[in-house]
Amino acid sequence: MTNNEEVIEELKRIVKQKGLKYTEQREIVLDILINAKGHLSAEDVYNEIKSKYSDSNIGIATVYRALGFLEEVDLITSIAFGTEGKKYESNAKSHHDHLICTTCGKIIEFIDDEIEKRQDRIAKKNNFKITSHSMQLYGTCKECQDK
């Protein structure tokens, strides 16, 4: 079973556990995010659905509800952009942190083993057990600096 199939099976398990009806709409939204190359807004997800699943009748309101549910059950995560809304990604990807341009909204993913080790040391020093974390650094990307 591929990682994508495992994530879809996890969705089915969660829905059943919560006593909810399984909907193809949630699966489609999750599939779009699992296969996305970057971070997508709700509108981006909706446009991908119209492109890849042209026979489906999923409206933008359904996309927002599905995104809310998938985030609530930790299958996806989001980065908030204030009045510009959120951008989403699947949690199926390996852990990484983000550099976020406050001018153009570009998101750069990065992994730094030293930062991860330092966080672990800080937690241990403070008798703290980390269950998850997210690092988002805000600033201006090279392209926007050069403008």
Image (cartoon, rainbow, N blue to C red):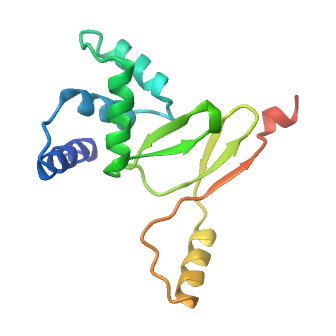
Vertical comparison of 61 with 109: above or below: above
- Quadrant of the image occupied by residue 21: top left
Of 83 and 15, nearer the camera is 83
Q: Residue 56's spot in the image, x, y percent? A: 24, 14
- In the rendered structure, the answer to whether residue 35 lies left or right of residue 18 reads right
Q: Residue 140's spot in the image, x, y percent? A: 79, 42
Q: Residue at 67% of width from left, 34% of height from top?
A: 105
Vertical comparison of 90 with 33: above or below: below
Vertical comparison of 91 with 126: above or below: above
Of 104 and 60, nearer the camera is 60
- In the rendered structure, the answer to whether residue 121 lies left or right of residue 1 reads right
Q: Residue at 35% of width from left, 52% of height from top?
A: 74
Q: Residue at 50% of width from left, 64% of height from top?
A: 133
Q: Residue at 52% of width from left, 55% of height from top?
A: 96
Can you name the residue that lies furthest to the top here? 55
Looking at the rendered image, the quarter that the C terminus falls into is: top right
Q: Residue 111's spot in the image, x, y percent? A: 57, 58
Q: Residue 122's spot in the image, x, y percent? A: 60, 82
- In the rendered structure, the answer to whether residue 74 lies left or right of residue 15 reads right
How many tags in the picture?
0
- In the rendered structure, the answer to whether residue 83 lies left or right of residue 62 reads right
